[in-house]
Image (cartoon, rainbow, N blue to C red):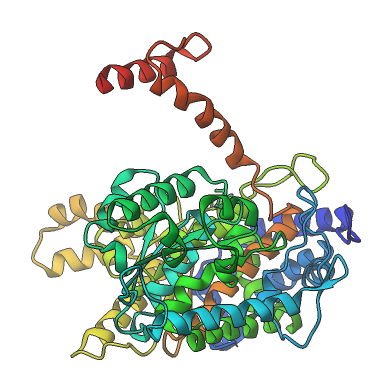
Amino acid sequence: MDYPDHYDTEAVLRCKQDLLQAAQEQENQTISDLFRQDPDRVVNFSLAAAGLHLDYSKTPLTEGVRSRLCQLANSAGLKALTEATFSGQVINHTEKRAVLHTALRGDPEEPVWVDGNNIKADVTTTLDRMEAFVEKVSDGQWLGFDGREITDIVSIGIGGSYLGPRVAIEALRPYWEEDLRCHFVSNIDAADLATTLEDLTPATTLFIIQSKSFKTQETLTNAESARDWFLKGGGESSEIGKHFVAVSSNVALAREFGIEESNIFPMWDWVGGRYSLWSAIGLPVALQVGMANFRKLLAGARAMDEHFREAPAEENMPVILALLGIWYQNFLGASSCAVIPYDQSLENLPAHLQQVDMESNGKTVDRSGNPVSMATGVVLWGGAGTNGQHAYHQLLHQGGEWIPVDFILPLKSHYPIGRHHAMLASNCLAQAQALMHGKSLESAMQELQAAGLSVEEAQKLAPHKVIPGNRPSHLITLEKLTPETLGSLIALYEHRVFVQGAIWDLNSFDQWGVELGKQLCDSLLPLLESPDASLQALDASTAAAVQRFRESSG
Ligand code: F6P
């Protein structure tokens, strides 16, 4: 490891034992009991920071457990690791890289050094280049090959080079620039590209090829097919420069593709793909909502960074959310967590957070290469409320496993139509209430009898109506979904992942697990495409599937 390691294994072990004991001691205590014991529970278990408010009172957390969990974070050297990260030390030791997405949104005057270079200067220059580009496109100075203005942007990228920008654009719909529409193509499935291009005109379309490595199969194949579409649609090779720009750290490959060097926006090794929204990967966002709003998004994230860096653990929103997750998973046995925004425009936030969380902490080897001693990583899932209420919430309420939920609710809507927003909010609050209170057999019986059922009938039906309750949820509210609050919200989850990775002693910033699939895919592709190639090296099931594919392709 290239940075001072402050992880105190012995102390972590002692904290774990303490916490296991605490979990046993409070086995029969319900969340409702905790509210009865502490009339100020809501105040004592709420926090406000960077435009967000977190109420975590509807949880099985006591003050004692909270302070033990904070000790755990302390023993894991969280503070030191945080400072090492923000100051540019090589935290991602398996790839020998610093982890500095926070520098992309940090104070430009505060230098951060990587290999003797103040990267803040590069960040500022890149933001200025983005601004100039955005202005040219939105002012109609950037013209397509037949002299018309650009009306459509197609961002081609996958994973971190796609999910964050898509979420930001969807979430910031009220801030969209008129006369410009951003589209996304990510999947290697041709349906994605074909259906996106269906209604577009080559002469007025600008492609942004988003790939840190410029080697990702899906992105390159989609980019090549997009270039073919452009050339078949009237564009000349010499005009590719007017219709294709790139964001990449691999300038040579982007140039080889045909993109002019002046149209390649940089990415750096010290920005991980899933944390790259804040870099030039955010270019589609800047085009769609304007550069001023993109800078506000960065400012919101910076406010959360400052809070995360400065607030003591017990008052630190990302730390508290992370510790709650650790409490549930490592001591109370949860294996999944749901993020449910009551905001249609955040429908795809869980998909972005899935990459941030699961690609970061879906690991079982610690930073020294030894197997970890506790459960790590969590299945993160979710979707927009109220839609989920008519789909998977049944399992949240009566399923065999309890699943902690983050409810996210903007207090004001951008669409003040009739009673919609109050209804949305009441649904959100009702779900959290239902999870906590549930319904006892006794009240189910009373309800059924009040509805006219006989005792015998009620006894048969009542068990189906019992809802266990005592299921935790957190309520994150914000005044309104703006570029600033969105930035702060996404940064909140990034830091939550960081804290959990620190406690589990993982390298949260590599992703070796995804490589094997890529390697196997590369060796299977020629077998699918050449009917005579031998399948002997394959397992029987894969060989049979390849054979079926070949037969079907004729
Ligand atoms: O899925 C693996 C991954 O490497 C992600 O971490 C990354 O965000 C994505 O692929 C895309 O990579 P690139 O930007 O290099 O095309």
Say left or right for 299 vs 344.
right
**Image quarter for residue 28?**
bottom right
Residue 375, percent from left and from top: 65, 47
| Picture layout, residue 396 above or below residue 119 | above
User: Is 237 in front, or is 290?
Assistant: 237
> Is residue 283 visible in this depiction of the protein?
yes
User: Is 221 in front, or is 426?
Assistant: 221
User: Is 494 in front, or is 204?
Assistant: 204
What residue is shown at x 65% (from left), y 79% (from top)?
A: 105
User: Is 318 in front, or is 463?
Assistant: 318
Quarter the C terminus occupies: top left
- Outermost right residue: 4
What residue is shown at x 42% (from left), y 54% (from top)?
A: 237
Say left or right for 163 vs 235.
right
Q: How many marks?
A: 0
> Is residue 47 visible in this depiction of the protein?
no
| Picture layout, residue 375 above or below residue 317 | above
What residue is shown at x 30% (from left), y 57% (from top)?
A: 394
**Image quarter for residue 66?**
bottom right
Residue 395, percent from left and from top: 35, 54
Residue 26, percent from left and from top: 62, 62
Residue 67, percent from left and from top: 74, 73
What residue is shown at x 29% (from left), y 51% (from top)?
A: 232
